[in-house]
Image (spheres, rainbow, N blue to C red):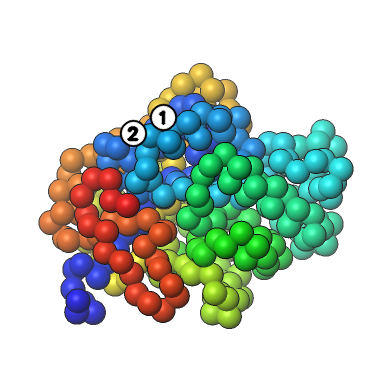
Amino acid sequence: MSHDSPASRFLIVNADDFGFGPGVNAGIAAAHTDGILTSTTLMANGDAFDDAVARARDLPDLGIGCHLVLLGGYPVAPASDVRSLLAPDGTFSNDFGGFLRRLIAGQLKQSEIVVEFRAQVEKILNAGIKLTHFDSHKHSHAHPLVLEAALKVAGEFGIGCIRKPYEKLGFTSFAGLDGGGKKTFVKQKLSAVVLERYAGPFARRMRASAIRTPDHFFGFAHTGLLNPRFLCYLLKRLPIGTSELMCHPAQLDASLNGAPTRLKESRVRELAALTAPEVRAEIDRLGVRLVNFNALGEKGSGIRDQGSGRGAT
């Protein structure tokens, strides 16, 4: 395969938050069976964890990773073992700014992060799920202290891949966005700029690690904003190598309506985008190969072509 062949562009389409709620689980399943979704990450502390595991049994071609959680919900490990990570009510705070300040101040014990991550992975494995990779809720593993904890646990359990949560700062598109969507995009793009301070240390650490990452990452600034026009725009500009597109599809139900998340109706729109016929047609026209994290193979060994049809493994 030549270096600049269209078939040398591979795309992992990963839905975060599997296990968050029944509507989220249903949306992820639909995006995989009826659309272009190839991968998801499961929240071990999600309210609908059992429902997600049951659905996974009927989705053998869906790659499933662990969505490591340090923000929102209850810990999986005994509270007494992870005290520094918890708010007074015994839950993880959902305030990322406060989490980052406490992390930088040394108030969150890295040893307890390891304990919690280990408990989350064990819960998923004990449910019969074979994990393909790690990522983290609200990209907490972008911080070096959390990354080290994740890599330690990945090594313990033989997890070979992790998300690289940095997208190219110059990549910008208002395709398919209205005025409100453009404002949200700009706000989220600024957050991506802030996160970029850790991109260099992340890259250096990963070069020294046996853990693999995709070459490129998209979806941070477009969180909750995916639409068919943007997806077709991205596909036309997909760089050589393996890219991950993060998404958050769902079917809107009572559990999602009442959940502590700003992503509600936007998840329904993302599901519609991921199942849009014109997006599938563009993938086929461009020869982009849909894969999941299993396709990364051994570091430096290239990638296994899994095809571009529905249900690519």
How many numbered circles does the render carry? 2
Proximity of marks 2 and 1: CB atoms separated by less than 8 Å: yes
Residue drawn at point x = 33 percent, y = 40 percent: 32
Residue drawn at point x = 70 percent, y = 47 percent: 119
- Say whether residue 189 is left or right of residue 34: right
Nearer to us in this view, 216 or 37: 37
- Say whether residue 282 is left or right of residue 145: left
Residue 151 vs 134, above or below: the answer is: below
Nearer to us in this view, 194 or 86: 86
Q: Disc 2 and disc 1: Cα gap in Å?
A: 6 Å
Percent position (x, y) of residue 68? 61, 50
The answer to which quarter of the image holds residue 15 is top left
Percent position (x, y) of residue 201? 61, 76
The answer to which quarter of the image holds residue 30 is top left
Extreme-top residue of the structure: 254
**In the rendered image, which residue does mark 2 sit on?**
30
Residue drawn at point x = 61 percent, y = 70 percent: 198
For label 1, the crowd category at 10 Å Cα-Cα, with few meaning under 14, some 14 to 19 and many 20 or more, is: many
Q: Given the image, on which type of amino acid does mark 2 rest? A: Ala
**In the rendered image, which residue does mark 1 sit on?**
26
Asked which secondary structure carries label 1, the reply is: helix
Percent position (x, y) of residue 185? 44, 50
